[in-house]
Amino acid sequence: MQEALDRLLREATLVTIALGIGLGWSLFQVAQGVATAVNGLLTKYPASDLAGYANSQPLTWIVHGRVLTLGSLLAGVVELAVVMAVAMLLTTRARSHAD
């Protein structure tokens, strides 16, 4: 296992490793945003607890006593889009330099 990891690190560039970490983290953030949205929709809150909640979170609405919040999902999607855009830019740049 250690030998395979050493070989992988020798063959991979630092940019590839950084993009892999960034992609993994942004996918985690998207999944966390989905979990937050689903959790809010599946939990029925008392009306007294909802008074200040919608004003304290971005992109949050109260729907029939349930909280729909999309702020963390949007943040994860933006992170994923940025990582993918950087990867595409670097791939395009590497191909143009190879020609």
Image (cartoon, rainbow, N blue to C red):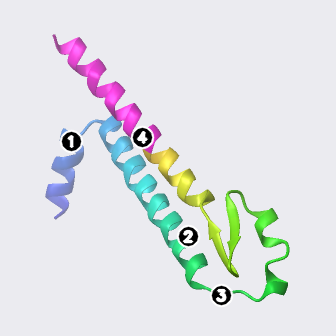
Q: Which residue is mark 3?
A: 44
Q: Which residue is mark 2?
A: 37
Q: Mark 2 belongs to which amino acid?
A: Ala
Hey, which residue is sitting farthest front in the picture? 64
Mark 2 packing: few (<14 Cα in 10 Å), some, or many (20+)? Answer: some
Helix, strand or loop status at disc 1: helix
Q: Tag 4 or tag 3, which sits nearer the N-term? A: 3
Disc 1 versus disc 2: distance between alpha carbons? Answer: 41 Å
Disc 3 versus disc 4: distance between alpha carbons? Answer: 36 Å
Disc 4 versus disc 1: distance between alpha carbons? Answer: 23 Å
Q: Position of residue 54 (x, y in %)?
A: 77, 67
Closest to the camera, between mark 1 and mark 3, is 3
The rendered magenta stretch, by its main secondary structure, is classed as helix
Q: Mark 1 belongs to which amino acid?
A: Arg
3 and 2 marks in contact (CB < 8 Å): no
Q: Which residue is mark 4?
A: 83
Q: Position of residue 93 (x, y in %)?
A: 30, 19
Residue 25 versus residue 42 in the image, above or below: above
Q: Tag 4 or tag 2, which sits nearer the N-term? A: 2
Closest to the camera, between mark 4 and mark 1, is 4
Q: Nearer the viewer, residue 75 or 83?
A: 75
1 and 2 marks in contact (CB < 8 Å): no
Q: Tag 1 or tag 4, which sits nearer the N-term? A: 1
Is residue 5 in the magenta section? no
Figure quadrant of residue 17: top left
